[in-house]
Image (cartoon, rainbow, N blue to C red):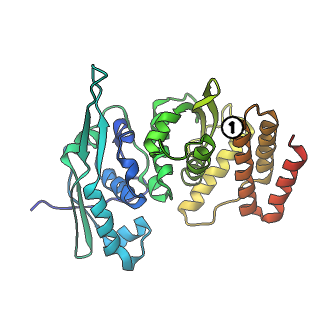
Amino acid sequence: MEQKKNTDTRKTVRTVTSNDFITAMGIDEMTLKARKLLYIAISQCKKNDQEFFEYQINAKDFAKLMDIEPDNVYREADKITDELMKSFIRLEKPQNNQKKKSYLKLQLFDMCQYENGLLYFQISKKMTGYFLNLKKDFTKPLLNDFLKMKSNYSIEIWHLIQREMKSIKPNSTDIIQFDLSLEELRAITGTQNKLKKIAHFKDKCFDKALREIYDNCGVNITYQNIRIGRKIVGFRCTAVSAVHIDTNNIPDDVKERARQGKERIRNSQKGEKMTKMDKEYIEKEYEQAIKEYNAALTEDDLDTARRTMKRLEAIAMQDYGFDYADELAMKKEACKK
């Protein structure tokens, strides 16, 4: 009988996937816990593996990784593995004749089993081309980044952003700029028929994901709308990494943001309380948001500025209390047009 391998859950483990997998249909329909177990499984694939092995993880580690009460492990594992065994991805296949449509559906798992306090799983052999022996067009985010996320939207958008950040080779800075199309964002998050108003999409999906990415991954991402005429078709993003920051030719306020982000990550990994965001930085960002509000030409621009102010007020309240948050709000009322 083939020896089963123990699951590697160290914080340095990465989930290596092809870029085609990121944009495949069907993944967006998975629950958060099922998706996390999927990424745990993917992360076990090693660089020189030629096939998928059967892996095992004990109930205690599984409960900790998935944030499940130990007494509920069996029931939750049963529910999650049921979902995984029914899950598949759908890939659209390009055709020379545009009138003809073609697609490919692939099951994600060959087997899941729970026995004697151990959970076993094995990825389907059909997924080999998406997780094994990848030479180009792939991403490798940290598994721990995904496990800390509280929203499917955050996982999906972070994976897509990782693809864009990996495709750009910065010279001496970790300030990276890239564009995200609204069509692709809606496709990977399954919001083609949800959150149809752009303001709702930003508030409930995109902005929420960017906040969680900053808190968990230490990358601060800001954006501007990309328009064709009056219609928003995407976002021009600027990402500042707090982990690999290079201080050459970087503005002081960006350096400070990076320093705070890096400290937050270190403290989080040690299980310590997150450090507070500096008041001077909060106020500078808040004043900039007010200026953008006053200079706004469209309702969407006004809405973006409002959300930025709202986010900073929430940080101020969390780090310094209601009185300080009220002070910021008073600045807004005094300066807004």
Relative to 227, residue 195 above or below: below
Compared across the picture, whether 284 is left or right of 215 comes to: right
Say which residue appears at 47% left-offset and 41% top-offset. 192
Spot occupied by residue 14 in the image (x, y as percentages of width and height): 39, 49
Q: Quadrant of residue 239?
A: top right
Relative to 251, residue 71 above or below: below
* Relative depth, front residue between 134 and 75: 75
Q: Tell me if I can see residue 14 in this picture.
A: no
Compared across the picture, whether 322 is left or right of 300 comes to: right
Residue extending farthest left: 1
The quarter of the picture where the N terminus appears is bottom left
Relative to 299, residue 307 above or below: below
Asked which secondary structure carries label 1, the reply is helix
Q: Which residue is mark 1?
A: 300
- The amino acid type of the residue labelled 1 equals Asp
* Relative depth, front residue between 135 and 114: 114
Compared across the picture, whether 171 is left or right of 162 comes to: right
Dot 1 crowding, Cα within 10 Å, few <14, some 14–19, many 20+: some
Number of disc labels: 1
Residue extending farthest right: 334
Say which residue appears at 58% left-offset and 55% top-offset. 265
The quarter of the picture where the C terminus appears is top right
Spot occupied by residue 331 in the image (x, y as percentages of width and height): 87, 50
* Relative depth, front residue between 60 and 317: 317
Say which residue appears at 79% left-offset and 53% top-offset. 279
Spot occupied by residue 2 in the image (x, y as percentages of width and height): 12, 59
Say which residue appears at 30% left-offset and 26% top-offset. 94
